[in-house]
């Protein structure tokens, strides 16, 4: 099966700081691929480059055969990005926010309506969607944004720290939602410094530290390779 | 185009929020309140007012003066008795002006001997009506003086015209504007043009300030609410995002400025607009003869100058908005912009750009916001080179700024540009 996303030798420099030192990885269709690493490892930079927010200093990114530098609009059409600290327009009702976002992706009103209906089902926010987003708790906002990211059935969802700042119940619900997407063929690229969460969610993971991918594989193969009980220990041994 | 209009509607809705609407209504209410108070004061000043008169002379001349005061919008409350007591009585009453005609006034005046009329103003505050009363009394006494001196001259030199004797030199004023000349007072023409255009700089300042503030706020709020990153990843061009923000800010800015100006005009409309129209009506042929009128082409050029200036302000404000991290920073960043707009505003009110020193002139004209402030003056006085230079300068300024703004939005800088108050931090 051809990979949905291919990253080759990706480099990013901010002035004198080299944030990514030539990382490479591939994401297959319907796969959840996790980038794990500590704060400052380069996870967010990688996701922001693939989401077209940042331009790479060097390297190649292809998505469904399209090159990032030549066709960034193709990436925007088929990729949904959920930033770590994303918010919704505070003065907009949840339902209006979904409508607003759906219209960018839908070819017509009927399709937009379908997207919104799907988002209503994904979010599970029910009647609260009629309230302004400014009144939502962090968990509710996250569910709304996750529903926004997935309502268009993107080829790939990029989720940066999807459960960051959420309580246990909300985190569990969000994880279940993410697991559910892949059953519909959506590929997921996610990042987290919560290695246990990534282990639970991901089909394959890449261990990233200081702009370099140390190792990659399924959680099981990595645990066996490093003779570790979980990914946290795998990561510690890989860094050593 | 579909996505652009979709974005534009969202931007307008975001800017036209409850807070803005409340503040605009509040402005209207406050201006209306101020307007009511000032209009009441003006009415009081223009209405017939009561003054006290103590005529200790009772001569024909003194009665004539009182008659004239009566005709000059005053209701006379005549007092009798000792002057000191009357002054005390008026001081304790609600009257605030007392005119005292001393005994022997008529005799001295008719024999052309020096004499005097005393006026006592009882200041109980600072009001327009208090000032106009004394001015009216003074004008009346001047007329009486004029009348008495004419009588004296007629008596002494019956063959001469008193008016000619008092003012043997007549003056004829001519005003020259470039190659055109007309008979008229330069003071009257300057006064009429100032009255005609006094509101224009205020309108310009408001439009530029409001639009700029709107766009800075719009971008800063996207950052504060953490919605900018998501917006930048939707399938719509960055140019459309920038243009939608700028256009929405211009629309809401113009609307806010219009409401502000309506309230301002309502509050500070001291002079009856009909008076200005009448004054201009009298001078209209002179202004036309001098070419001090604006034709359709002039208005179009002024419109172009204003349009380019608004674009400059919006583009500059967009860049400042990118630098702002939140609403509070956006407010601070808009302050220097406001001060830059105020430079040409005050210069256009109190100085003539053409008579300024060359370095000062260059400095003022380097501000892109300056040009529409002087555009009308340049059109009327035929300084077309200055006008065109301003338009070309602003056009180039707009092109550079828009290119820069679109570049910022098309690259990482929209997310990484920050004011370096502290050590730079990069999220990896």
Image: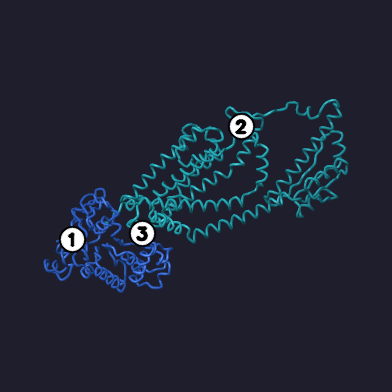
Tell me what residue is drawn at x 85 percent, y 29 percent. Answer: B154
Image disc number at residue A2: 1
Image disc number at residue A104: 3
Depth check: B253 or B164 in front? Answer: B253
Asked if the residue at tag 3 contacts the one at tag 1, i.e. Cβ–Cβ closer than 8 Å, the answer is no
Q: CA distance from mark 2 to mark 3?
A: 58 Å
Disc 2 versus disc 3: nearer the observer: 3
The answer to whether A195 appears left or right of B101 in the picture is left
Q: Chain of mark 1?
A: A
Q: Do marks 1 and 3 both belong to one polypeptide chain?
A: yes
Q: Do marks 2 and 3 both belong to one polypeptide chain?
A: no
Q: CA distance from mark 1 to mark 2?
A: 81 Å
Tell me what residue is drawn at x 66 percent, y 32 percent. Answer: B184
Q: Which shade of the palette goes to chain B?
A: cyan
* Secondary structure under the numbered disc 3 in the rendered image: helix
Depth check: B149 or B334 in front? Answer: B334
Q: Which residue does the numbered mark 2 point to in the structure image?
A: B290
Q: CA distance from mark 1 to mark 3?
A: 28 Å
Q: Chain of mark 2?
A: B
Where's residue B341, x and y in %?
A: 48, 44
Depth check: B252 or B223 in front? Answer: B252
Image disc number at residue B19: none
Instruction: Report the chain shown in blue.
Output: A
């Amino acid at each position: 099966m051809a990979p949905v996303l291919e990253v080759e030798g990706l480099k990013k420099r901010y002035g004198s700081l080299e944030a990514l030192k030539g990382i490479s990885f591939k994401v297959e269709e319907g796969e959840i691929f996790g980038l794990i690493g500590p704060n400052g490892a380069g996870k967010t930079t990688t996701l922001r480059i693939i989401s077209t927010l940042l331009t790479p200093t060097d390297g190649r990114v292809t998505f469904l055969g399209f090159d990032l530098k030549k066709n960034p609009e193709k990436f925007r059409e088929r990729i949904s990005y959920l930033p770590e600290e994303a918010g919704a327009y505070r003065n907009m009702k949840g339902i209006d926010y979904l409508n607003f976002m759906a219209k960018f992706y839908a070819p017509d009103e009927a399709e937009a309506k379908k997207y919104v209906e799907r988002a209503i089902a994904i979010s599970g926010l029910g009647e609260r969607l009629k309230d302004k987003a400014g009144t939502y708790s962090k968990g509710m906002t996250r569910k709304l944004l996750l529903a926004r990211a997935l309502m268009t059935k993107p080829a790939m969802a990029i989720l940066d720290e999807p459960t960051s700042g959420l309580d246990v119940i909300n985190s569990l619900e969000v994880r279940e939602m993410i697991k559910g997407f892949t059953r519909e063929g959506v590929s997921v690229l996610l990042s987290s410094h919560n290695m246990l969460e990534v282990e639970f969610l991901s089909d394959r993971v890449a261990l990233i530290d200081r702009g370099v991918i140390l190792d990659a594989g399924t959680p099981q193969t990595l645990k066996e390779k490093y003779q570790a009980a979980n990914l946290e220990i795998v990561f510690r041994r890989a860094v050593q | 185009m579909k996505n652009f209009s979709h974005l534009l509607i969202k931007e307008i809705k975001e800017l036209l929020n409850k807070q803005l609407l409340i503040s605009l209504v509040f402005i209207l209410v406050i201006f209306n309140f101020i307007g009511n108070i000032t209009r009441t004061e003006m009415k009081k000043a223009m209405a017939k007012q009561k003054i006290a008169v103590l005529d200790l002379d009772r001569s024909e001349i003194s009665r004539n003066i009182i008659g004239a005061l009566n005709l000059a919008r005053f209701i006379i409350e005549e007092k009798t008795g000792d002057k000191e007591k009357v002054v005390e009585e008026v001081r304790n009453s609600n009257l605030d002006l007392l005119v005292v005609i001393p005994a022997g006034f008529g005799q001295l005046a008719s024999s052309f001997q020096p004499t005097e009329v005393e006026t006592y103003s009882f200041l109980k505050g600072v009001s327009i009506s208090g000032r106009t009363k004394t001015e009216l009394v003074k004008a009346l006494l001047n007329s009486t003086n004029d009348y008495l001196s004419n009588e004296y001259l007629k008596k002494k030199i019956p063959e001469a015209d008193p008016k000619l004797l008092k003012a043997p030199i007549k003056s004829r004023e001519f005003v020259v504007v470039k190659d055109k000349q007309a008979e008229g007072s330069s003071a009257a023409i300057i006064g009429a043009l100032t009255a005609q255009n006094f509101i224009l700089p205020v309108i310009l300042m408001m439009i530029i300030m409001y639009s700029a503030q709107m766009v800075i706020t719009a971008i800063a709020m996207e950052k504060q609410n953490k919605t900018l990153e998501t917006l930048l990843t939707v399938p719509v061009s960055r140019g459309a995002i920038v243009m939608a923000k700028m256009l929405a800010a211009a629309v809401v800015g113009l609307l806010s400025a219009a409401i502000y100006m309506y309230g301002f005009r309502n509050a500070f409309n001291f002079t009856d607009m009909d008076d200005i129209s009448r004054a201009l009506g009298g001078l209209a042929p002179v202004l036309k003869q001098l070419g001090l009128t604006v034709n359709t082409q002039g208005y179009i050029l002024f419109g172009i100058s204003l349009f380019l200036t608004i674009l400059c302000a919006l583009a500059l404000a967009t860049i400042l908005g990118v630098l702002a991290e939140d609403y509070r920073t956006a407010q601070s960043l808009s302050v220097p912009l406001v001060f830059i707009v105020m430079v040409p505003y005050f210069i256009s009110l109190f100085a003539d750009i053409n008579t300024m020193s060359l370095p000062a002139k260059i400095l003022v004209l380097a501000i892109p916001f300056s040009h529409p402030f002087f555009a009308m003056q340049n059109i009327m006085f035929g300084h077309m080179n200055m006008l065109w230079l301003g338009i070309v300068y602003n056009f180039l300024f707009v092109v550079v700024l828009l290119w820069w703004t679109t570049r910022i939005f098309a690259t990482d800088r929209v997310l990484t540009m920050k004011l370096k108050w502290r050590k730079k931090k990069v999220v990896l």
